[in-house]
Image (cartoon, grey):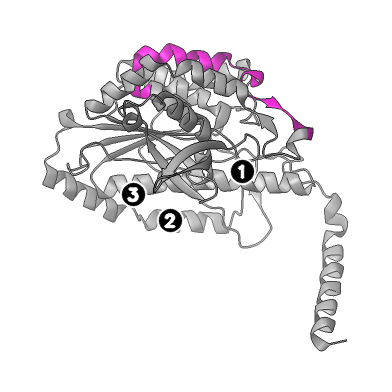
Amino acid sequence: MPPSVAIIGVTLLSAVAGCHTSRGPLARAASPTDVGLNTRDVVDPVAQPLADAALTTLDASTPAREAGDAARERAGAAAQDARHVLCLSGGGSYGAYAAGVLCGWTQSGRRPAFDVVTGISTGALIAPFAFLGPRYDGAIRHFYTETRTRDVYVKRPVRGLFSEALADDAPLRRTIDGMVTWGFVADIAAAHREGRRLYVGTTELEGRRFIVWDVGGIACRGRPDDRALICDVLAASAAIPGFFPPVRIPVSIDGRVLAEKHGDGGVTQGIFFRPPWPPDRPAAGTRVWCVVAGKLYADPAPLRPRALAIAGRSLSDIIFAQTRGDLQRIYTLAQLNGMDFQMTAIADDFPAPAESTEFNPPELRAMFDEGFRQARSGRAWRGTPPGVAPGEAPRERAGTCLTEVPKR
C-alpha cells in the first residue's frame, strides 16, 4: 500500500472514531431550544460584557457621520428639497408586513412621494404599487391579507424531483398578469418621464449575477411586448430557485435571439439602493427608507437531525446575514454621502410564522396589522443599521458556562 493511501486510511479511521466518541451521549442530549430557551438570550456572563464594551468604545460609524455632515454642508441640502428612495427587501409572505407599513404610513399623513423605488422578490411585487402612490394601497392590502398558498403556487413534489421546480407558480403568474394592465404600464411610464425611477432586481442564474431592471425604462419603450417583459421581470424576481421554475427572458445579443434564465433577486442581494435621477445631482439630503419583509435575525427553532433540514436552515441563515450586510452597506453609503438612513423590520418578539413560503390569511393579516400600526404611529423606523441595537452584537464566549438574560 502506498504511504499516502495508508496515511489517508488512518486519518479517516481516526476521524470516524473521533466523531463516534464525540457524539456519544451528546447525540441524545436536549438542545437549548428543545427545553424552551430563547437562544438569543443565552450569553457568556464573562465574555459578553467585555465584547459589548469594546464595541461601544469603538464607534466605527463616527468617521462616516463626519463625512456625511461635510457632504451635506457642501451641497447646502435643505430639508424641504429632500428626495426619497424606498428600498423593499425580499421575504415571501412576510411582505405582508411591508404592505402594512406602506398603508399605515399613508394613514399617518407622513408618507412621501418616492423619487426611486427598488424591490426584490416579494418587494418586487410591492414596488410598482408603492411607486405609483397611495391610490394603490387597496391592491397591496388585498393581496397581502387575502392571498392563500394555492393562489401563489401548486406543489408538485414527485414531478419536481425530476424537473426544474418543486412547485408550479402559474397562479402567481396569473395574478401578476391581471395586475399589470396596459394602463398600469402607462402610469409607470408617465412617472418615469417625470424623472422618477422604478427598479427590480433578479438573478441571472447561469451568469450568477444580480441584474437591475429599469422598469420605467421598459414601460417607455413603446413596444408591444413591454407589458409581457415587465410581468416576466416581476415573476422572475420572486422565483425561488428550485421551488419555482426559472423565468426565460428573450434577449438579443449582437443580433442573436437567445433566452436567459432569471430567478429570485434575493439569491444575490437581499435589498438594494439606487440614487435619485439625475445621478450627477448631489445625493446629500436624500432620505433612504429600507423596509425589510421579515426579521433581521431568524427566530431560534429546534433543528431536525436530517441533512436536508440542516442544509435548508443554513441557507436561510445565509440569506438573513446577506440582507443585514446589504443594509449595513446602504447605511454606510448614506452616511458617507450625507443621506438620511431609516429602516424598519418585524420586531424580534413578534410571533411571525415559521415559513415565508406559506400564505395563510390570518397570519398575513397579523403581520400587515403590525406593520400598519408601527408606521401609522411613527414607531416603525430606526436610524441605525443591523448589529448596533441592544442584543444584536455577535455573541462572544470564553467557555461553556452560560446564562440566560432575557431582554427587557
Q: Is residue 85 above or below residue 20?
A: above
Task: Please tell me the numbered disc located at residue 316.
Answer: 1
- What residue is shown with label 2? 55
The amino acid type, in three-letter code, at marker 1 is Ser
Residue 297 sits in quarter: top right
Quadrant of res 17: bottom right
Local secondary structure at mark 3: helix
Residue 238 part of the magenta-drawn span? no
Q: Tell me what residue is drawn at x 44 percent, y 30 percent.
A: 229
Q: Earlier in the sequence, mark 1 or mark 2?
A: 2
Q: Where does the image place residue 269, in percent across and percent down from the top left?
A: 47, 44
Q: Position of residue 351 (x, y in %)?
A: 61, 27
- Residue 147 in the image, given as x and y percentages of width and height: 59, 16
Where residue 355 sits, quadrant-wise, is top right
Start and end of the magenta stretch? 130-158
Left or right of residue 344, residue 365 in this image: right
Q: Nearer the viewer, residue 295 or 207?
A: 207
| Residue 332 numbered tag | 3
Q: Is residue 379 visible?
A: no
> Residue visible at 38% across and 41% down?
384
Secondary element under disc 2, as helix, strand or loop, is: helix
Between circles 1 and 2, the one closer to the viewer is 1
